[in-house]
């Protein structure tokens, strides 16, 4: 378990810009390119945005019916509207419960250093989700407001829920 680092992301994100990494791995057909392992890692770090040839950042999402957004690169879907606090907390707490069991299990079975470190890091990061979400949401909500004002006559913005400002 500890000797093989199968789960390690092969792209060292570190301080690198994930949008740049993704942009360098897009085929002419607009799909992620690389070996199976590379694509798995790319999907994990996909920021759902890419740079154009001129260096402009563009999102890579489409509306996937209902209130869902879908990334055309990694294929992941998520709801377009912001989570209500109680829903967010419920989802994060459920994840945290899984991670707590993992932390317990890792010690109980005497898992290797690498596994213990990984599960500890997951726990630390997970503990930051609620605060981080609120921070991001506050900025996004402000932008939505500004854009809605600007677009009053052009409409359309509202049909994209909280992300009207993304769709000019
Ligand atoms: Zn994506």
Image (spheres, grey):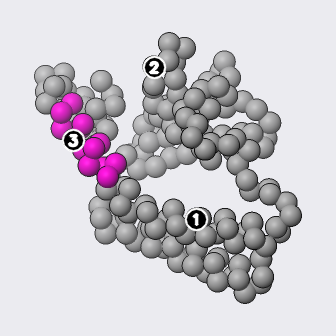
Residue 122, x across and y down, in percent: 58, 65
| Above or below 29: residue 116 | below
Magenta region: 135-147
Mark 2, residue position: 56
Residue 40 visible in this rendered orientation of the protein: no
Question: Who's the residue at 13% across and 30% down the image?
Answer: 149
Q: Earlier in the sequence, mark 3 or mark 1?
A: 1
Question: Who's the residue at 34% across and 31% down the image?
Answer: 166
C-alpha distance separating marks 3 and 1: 30 Å
Outermost residue to the top: 54
Which element is circle 1 on?
Answer: helix
Q: Nearer the viewer, residue 9 or 36?
A: 9
Residue 21, x across and y down, in percent: 62, 32
126 left or right, relative to 107 = left
Q: Earlier in the sequence, mark 2 or mark 1?
A: 2
Residue 45, x across and y down, in percent: 60, 44
Which element is circle 2 on?
Answer: loop
Label disc, if present, on residue 122 of the rendered structure: 1
Q: Earlier in the sequence, mark 2 or mark 3?
A: 2
Picture quadrant of residue 30? top right
Mark 3, residue position: 142
């Amino acid at each position: 378990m500890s000797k093989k680092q199968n789960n390690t992301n092969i792209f060292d994100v570190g301080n690198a810009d994930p949008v740049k990494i993704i942009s360098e791995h897009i085929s002419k057909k607009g799909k992620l390119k690389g070996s199976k392992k590379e694509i798995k890692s790319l999907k994990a770090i996909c920021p759902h945005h890419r740079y154009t040839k001129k260096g402009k950042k563009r999102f890579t999402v489409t509306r996937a019916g209902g209130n869902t957004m879908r990334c055309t690169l990694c294929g992941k879907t998520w709801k377009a509207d912001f989570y209500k606090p109680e829903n967010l907390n419920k989802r994060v707490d459920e994840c945290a419960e899984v991670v707590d069991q993992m932390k317990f299990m890792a010690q109980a079975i005497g898992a290797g250093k690498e596994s213990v470190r990984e599960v500890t890091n997951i726990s630390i990061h997970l503990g930051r989700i609620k605060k981080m979400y609120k921070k991001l949401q506050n900025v996004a909500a402000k932008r939505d407001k500004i854009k809605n004002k600007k677009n009053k006559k052009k409409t359309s913005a509202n049909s994209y829920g909280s992300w009207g400002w993304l769709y000019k």
